[in-house]
Amino acid sequence: MAKIEVKELLEAGVHFGHLTRKWNPNMAPYIYMERNGIHILNLYKTAAKLEEAGEAIKKIAASGRKILFVATKKQAKDVVSEKAKQANMPYITERWPGGMLTNFVTIRKAVKKMASIDKMKQDGSFNTLSKKERLQVDRLRAKLEKNLGSISDMSRLPGALFVVDIMAEHIAVREAQKLNIPVFAMVDTNSDPREVDYVIPANDDASKSIEKILSYIVSDIQEGLSNRKNEKSESETEAAPKPAKKEVVKDEVPQPVVADKAAVEAEKTDEEE
């Protein structure tokens, strides 16, 4: 895991919270002070929580399960999609589809519909449709791509959710809670940390802050994936059949010729006579 530098968090503005009148009292343990009517987060606690979350998310990645990134607010969209792609993980940056987790079977059908349209275009059956039908199919494909294209590789429920701003993504958090899917989240001073399994107290409004936190998280995910790959290759090496042991044939040592006992005795008798 990359060493978390408090100075870097400070430079990225991770410590800036919301106006004091908008605070959630449950965030009190993570608040350092108040300045000019704004709450300031304790970055040492942020670093500790970030490290704890990183270790947990690394294990999930190493197990082969997916981590679904969720951020639909304007300043987080581009950062999250870029970082999720780096980690080769699914993400939602457009509107959260209701029932995305709790009704996952239906969502998978929509993703398969997208794949079937692509197949139609490849095998030529798309060209047999009328102009109006082709236009409708193209519009449906574009809509599905926009909303679900980023999760097309997610064939089963994710092992965890990483959320930026749990207030904006409260529906996603609630669905994850129903299915006991662990939630990792950047939690600002106006949010309730009790709704999250792994709290990372941080400014969830500034793109620099979001990028800094995600850079650490993505690094941990990549490390977990790398560990999984190494373990897999090691196990395959161990499971591979070992070559048969070649039998070493020792060179035959010529045995000394032993004279016939009767002949030797006869020779001795002749000498004595």
Image (spheres, helix red, strand yellow):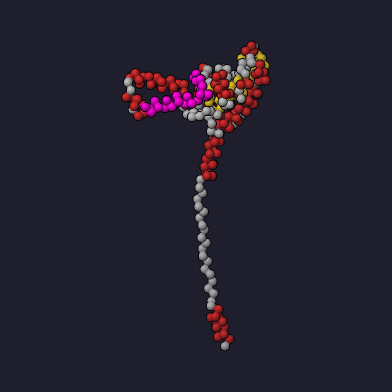
Count how many numbered circles sit on residues in the image: 0
Question: Where is residue 69 shown, x and y percent of the image?
Answer: 53, 24
State left or right for residue 113 relative to residue 96. Answer: left
Question: Where is residue 218 shown, x and y percent of the image?
Answer: 55, 28
Question: Where is residue 249 shown, x and y percent of the image?
Answer: 51, 60
Q: Is residue 234 magenta?
A: no
Residue drawn at 55 percent across, 83 percent down: 266
Question: Where is residue 195 shown, x and y percent of the image?
Answer: 61, 21
Residue 253 seen in render: yes
Tell me the quarter of the picture where residue 140 sits: top left
Residue drawn at 53 percent across, 20 percent down: 71
Outermost residue to the bottom: 273
Residue 80 seen in render: no
Q: Is residue 133 above or below residue 242?
A: above
Magenta stretch in the rendered image? 92-120
Quadrant, the C terminus: bottom right
Residue drawn at 32 percent across, 24 percent down: 128
Residue drawn at 61 percent across, 16 percent down: 190
Tell me the quarter of the picture where residue 121 sits: top left
Viewer-proximal residue among 135 and 76: 135
Viewer-proximal residue among 124 and 83: 124
Viewer-proximal residue among 270 and 49: 49
Quadrant, the N terminus: top right
State left or right for residue 17 relative to residue 145. Answer: right
